[in-house]
Image (cartoon, grey):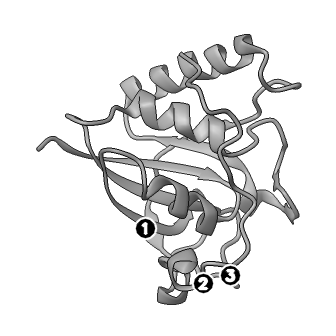
Amino acid sequence: MNKKKAYIAGGCFWGMEELFRKRPGILDTEVGYIGGSNDNPTYKNHPGHAEGIELDYDADITSFTEILDYFFRMHNPTTVDQQGNDLGSSYRSAIFYQNDEEKKLSEEFIEIVNNSGRWPSKVVTTLEPYSTFWPAEPEHQDYLQLRPNGYTCHFERFDTPFK
């Protein structure tokens, strides 16, 4: 097994976690806060942090690029600080790259998405260097598994890859 991690944000973390957990090669998911200004953030106090997700994946089964492809199909990357009814920088679209290779792959994939014409506007997803990922409180983990009819604004918008 070739275990790796990826860190992304695209609105409320509940819906992202639920969709990604079903993807081939995803070994584990955890929701949390990333990219902000305080240590030990909480749901009520996470200034500058995005509601993000940590993905553990088997790189022998899925790639970082395949994760990006699904990421850009399951949320709207063209709205600044918004997904569905959720507003604010906590709900920004962001990729938290861990190295130069992930940054380059992210830049290239954003260009693919923009050139595809599938979204009516250009991608506003930010590329931010990885910072500490702070797991969210237990009541936010596996939220839609525990509450199948709970709120989400995430769904697969395009059923074919961007590639």
Q: Amino acid at mark 1?
A: Glu
In the displayed structure image, the side of residue 88 where residue 16 appears, left or right: left
Instruction: Give the residue drawn at x 69%, y 37%.
Output: 125
- The picture places residue 152, in percent across and down from the top left corner, at 71, 66
Q: Nearer the viewer, residue 101 or 157?
A: 157
- Screen quadrant of the N terminus: top left
Disc 2 target residue: 147
Q: Are marks 1 and 2 in contact (CB under 8 Å)?
A: no
Disc 1 target residue: 30
Q: Amino acid at mark 2?
A: Arg
State the CA–CA distance, disc 3 to disc 2.
24 Å
Disc 3 target residue: 45
Q: Amino acid at mark 3?
A: Asn
Give the quadrant of residue 60. Answer: top left
Q: Nearer the viewer, residue 75 or 90?
A: 75
Instruction: Give the residue drawn at x 67%, y 20%.
Output: 113
Q: Nearer the viewer, residue 52 or 115?
A: 115
State the CA–CA distance, disc 3 to disc 1.
19 Å
**Image height of 128 relative to 160, above or below:** below
Neighbourhood count class around disc 2 (C-alpha, 10 Å): few under 14, some 14–19, many 20 upward: few
Which of label 1 and label 2 is nearer to you? 2
Neighbourhood count class around disc 1 (C-alpha, 10 Å): few under 14, some 14–19, many 20 upward: many
- The picture places residue 108, in percent across and down from the top left corner, at 55, 16
State the CA–CA distance, disc 1 to disc 2.
16 Å
Which of label 3 and label 1 is nearer to you? 1
Give the quadrant of residue 88. Answer: bottom right
- The picture places residue 42, in percent across and down from the top left corner, at 60, 82
Give the quadrant of residue 46. Answer: bottom right
Does label 3 or label 2 sit earlier along the sequence?
A: 3
Q: Which mark is residue 144?
A: none
**Image height of 76 relative to 162, above or below:** below
